[in-house]
Image: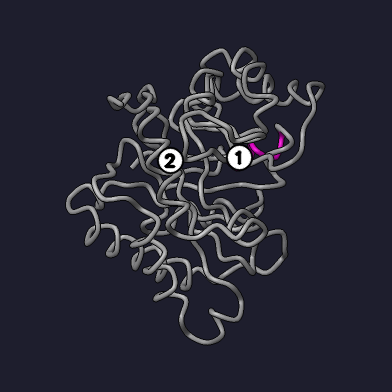
Amino acid sequence: MRPLVVGNWKMNGLAEQLSEIEAMAISVKATLPSVDALICLPATLIAQAVLMATGRIAIGGEDCSAEICGAFTGDISAEMLMDAGAHAVIVGHSERRQQHAETDAVVAAKANAARRAGLLAIICIGETHSQRLAGTALSVCARQITGSVPEGMTASNTVIGYEPLWAIGSDEVPTHSQIMQMHAHIRACLTQRLGAEGQKVRILYGGSVKPSSADAILRLPQVGGVLVGGASLKAADFLAICRAAPLAPAHTPTRPKEQRR
């Protein structure tokens, strides 16, 4: 399974920071042909970033509305992201779930919107620290997969991002054993949910991924890539994480086929 390294800039970045995208694109094309690299940006930067990336790395959005269009002031549809040149969109990130009270049903609706527009949906799940301590992490993530991953999704339009909430933005990272256990569990849940397609969906690990920790994480079973936060803001750090990915046969990433409306 070809590694996917996704950067999430969150609410960071002005036009002057797009030089980082240019530096990433040049290096990925020249020295990292076996890694799929994707940077998800604030919507204000997507169109410019697509020009900077020149097809060398993929550009995505950080969230989308479930609606196509209408009287939803401030919202951005999946179709608008596609129109700006985006390849993918993150839905259900823990910060959206916590700070905006997004439920599994809301996340599923946004994933469906991504599929409708022809975008890759990066569906995020993960447990809190209290849930981990209570021993319910596996059941929590299973419930989120059932509620957040629409039926009929495929490996070509779906990626799962596992982010233990207690590891995001901290120096506390799950043990390799914990990561392997959770990723194996997610694989089983995806197979139950999506059948044979569930065996092919890439499962990313996210939560304080840094150049120093990426190599070991990317070599764990069932880890199909990583979802990177702060370390994706600088080309040097993001590229170091990309270089840590195990070698895989090169191919040209393709956008999911657009669904008929």
Between 36 and 149, the one lying in front of the other is 149
Amino acid bearing label 1? Gly
Q: Is residue 24 left or right of residue 114?
A: right
Q: Classify 36 as above or below 176.
A: above
Disc on the earlier residue, 2 or 1: 1
Report the residue at 37% width, 59% height from top. 221
Please provide the residue range marked out in magenta.
236-241
- Queried whether the magenta region covers residue 255, the answer comes back as no
**Amino acid of disc 2:** Ala
Q: Nearer the viewer, mark 2 or mark 1?
A: 2
Return the x and y of residue 190 as percentages of the image width and height.
29, 58
Left or right, residue 188 beside residue 212: left
Name of the residue lying farthest toward the front: 71
List x then y, in percent, for residue 104: 45, 59
| Res 71 quadrant in image | top right
Secondary element under disc 2, as helix, strand or loop, is: strand
Residue at x-position 41% and y-position 75%: 138
User: Label 1, on which residue?
Assistant: 7
Quarter of the image with the N terminus is top left
Question: How much space separates mark 2 and mark 1, taking CA atoms?
Answer: 14 Å
Element carrying mark 1: strand
- Quarter of the image with the C terminus in it: top left
Callout 2 crowding tier (Cα within 10 Å): few <14, some 14–19, many ≥20: many
Question: Which dot marks residue 121?
Answer: 2
